[in-house]
Image (spheres, rainbow, N blue to C red):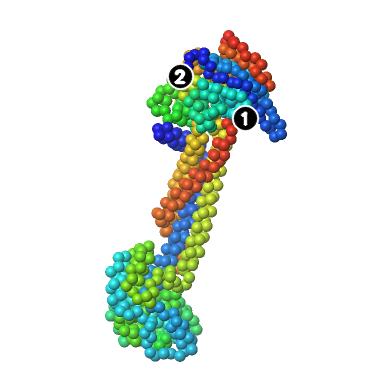
Amino acid sequence: MNRFWSSVKTAFFIAGRDVAKNVGVLAVVLLALGFLFTNLLFARFMVLGFQDTLEYDVIKVSGALSLVVQEKHEEEEKEDSSKLASSQYNLEREEADYLQDAPLLENKIATIPGVTAVTSILTSSAILKHGTKEQPAMIMGFPSDDRVTVISRSIVKGRFFEPGYNIERESGIVLGRYLAEKLAKKRGKPSLEPGDVVRVIFRNGRLKRYTVRGIINVRDYSVNYNAILPRDELQAVLKTKPDEASEILIKVNDKRRVPEIINVIAAFTSPKVRVESWEEKDYIGLPDLVRGFNLVGQIIFWVGLLSSAVVIAVVIYVNAVRKRRQIGIIRAIGIKNWLILLVFSVQAFLLAGLSVGVGTGFYYLLDSYLHQHPIVMPFGDMATSFQLHTYLVAVKLFLATAVCAGLYPAWIVTREPIAQITAEIG
Amino acid sequence: MTKNSVLVDVRDLRKTYRMGKVEVNALNGVTLQIRRGEFVSVTGASGSGKTTLLNMIGLLDDPTDGAIMVDGEDTRKLSTRDKSEFRLRRLGFIFQFFNLFMELTAIENIVLPALAIGASRENYMTKAVTLMRSVGLERRIRHYPFELSGGEQQRVAIARALMNNPILVLTDEPTANIDSVMSNKVVDLFVRINRERGVTVLMATHEKELAAKASRILELRDGNLVADRKNIPS
């Protein structure tokens, strides 16, 4: 044991000296490997940043943070679409569309650990008209005390519905930015403004006139095409009961708990009720986009890792070949091959370890810059998203790859017959 | 083991190298014995088989035929691992090129074999300093090889070879890369090591003047031992 540790210490000693021997070469190698490691981190954390941006913005504006409780009604939806298309409006309410006992469900869900806010909403498809322009849209009925979404805080023109808002007095409606623009196109102005009047034909055939109270602009394409009414107003129009809801939107404190929370909710809800994360609910194929970017990130990561392996292998190989004579001599002296391999492995490990430090430093600078100057994308401001777990995985893989890459060229040199090397020397 | 007992016993040693389709006989049935405490020179022209003989006795290469007993061990029965261990603990090597680790100081180069056997720092450092003194480099302990002359580097290599108290030191053309004055000093050092420490030395050299410092001279020609004579060192 004493001999083993002595050998390990010797390996570290020789490798350390070798690494530190030529500062110029060391600097170049560390820069190359450091940049490769930065690239590994950047590729991975940019994708995570992209994912975070998407999730964060979608979750905070599209309703549910991660979970949606929604009655299953696929067949009826098809039927409803055909009704709208043919303008055969049904003035009766549709029982099957709504969750029953929504307040009770809300209370139960609110007690689940990890759930931070719950809001039940009503939704209905409708056609909005302004002058000659008409546009199909989703109408969302939000309670004034919604704490799940940021919709009420996303007003860019006019105002939202404050608590106690009296619909009878103003008949206000809030429009998503794109919806307001679509309805205004043929009127010679870029967008409807607060005070403009729109007519809404609900899917039950009811027609009502509303005055635009505000325009919201959120980082969610689909919600910007929606219109928002106070929940009570939509309830009255759709003739639903106060304890009925189209969806229950839920905010959780940690998205990793979503599967667990889904299971808890599924245990006390009817089998007809769908409990979905935002990815499952999916608005405009964002999960596919995230998966696509994730794949690109993975490819960049693994290519980067292989590039690092090649660089380290070349560095170690050049060093091993340069030291061929010394290796031959110390093998002749009787120093075992495994100790020689250990020296080169440790050398690779030290190089990789130092490169991790350099690469992390570069990444930190890049990360700081991107957080100060995020990339502005249609779905949100994008920056890198550091994750300690992913970082540690990258470090471990980088070090392991380096050691393997360093071992092989050294192994080749230690396979050569000692007599051949010493004969060449003599 | 008593002084004058046989340390190296070589019987009908043959080595054939295959170079493409051509077979080259480097040694053609060499038989010899070396006693403990002897200083033996192996002379001969280039290609006579000096290095091959040293490689066989030093367990760096395997014979094609024949037997070698070193310190009572039949080397044919040793595994590669055993041979490494044997070399580390019982043999010392000095080659033409000093091949010191440039990134290690003189004393760090010397202690390498001791580190490989797990010796304690206190022991090996004391011994390394003593060896440095005995080879006349006590003022060069912290110097790097590139700060030393060729002769000084070779003396570091000699000290390294002696670090684990070898019973046999094998040295192949140790003076080939140093000037004549320094060559004499290096060979004198072998003589001193042989006399003072009782270490058996087997030195291959093509320089007759240096070979004459040994107590016995072997002469090889075309892989055959053509002369084996006692010598009164000059």
Above or below, comparing residue B211 to residue A36 in the picture: above
Amino acid under disc 2: Arg
Amino acid type at circle 1 is Glu
Are the residues under badges 1 and 2 in a single subunit? no
The quadrant the C terminus of chain A occupies is: top right
Residue at image location 50% in from the left, 17% down from the top = B199
Q: The disc numbered 1 marks a residue on which chain?
A: A
Q: Indicate the position of residue A31 as horizontal and vertical percent values.
A: 50, 46
Looking at the rendered structure, the secondary structure element under dot 2 is: helix
Q: Mark 2 points at which residue?
A: B133
Residue at image point 52% right, 60% down: A296
Image height check: is A266 above or below A405?
below
Q: Which type of secondary structure does the marked residue at label 1 adopt?
A: helix
Q: Indicate whether A286 appears above or below B76.
A: below
Name the residue that disc number 1 marks.
A424
A361 over A178 or under it: above or below: above
Residue A172 numbered mark, or none: none
Determine the residue positioned at 51% across, 45% down.
A404
- Give how far apart the Cα atoms at labels 1 and 2 are: 31 Å
Residue B188 in view of the camera: no
For the residue pair A195 and A259, the one nearer the viewer reads as A259
Residue A99 lies, in percent from the top left, at 35, 79
* Residue toward you, A384 or B211: B211
Q: In this orientation, which residue lies closer to the viewer: B142 or A325?
A: A325
Left or right of A171 in this view: A300? right
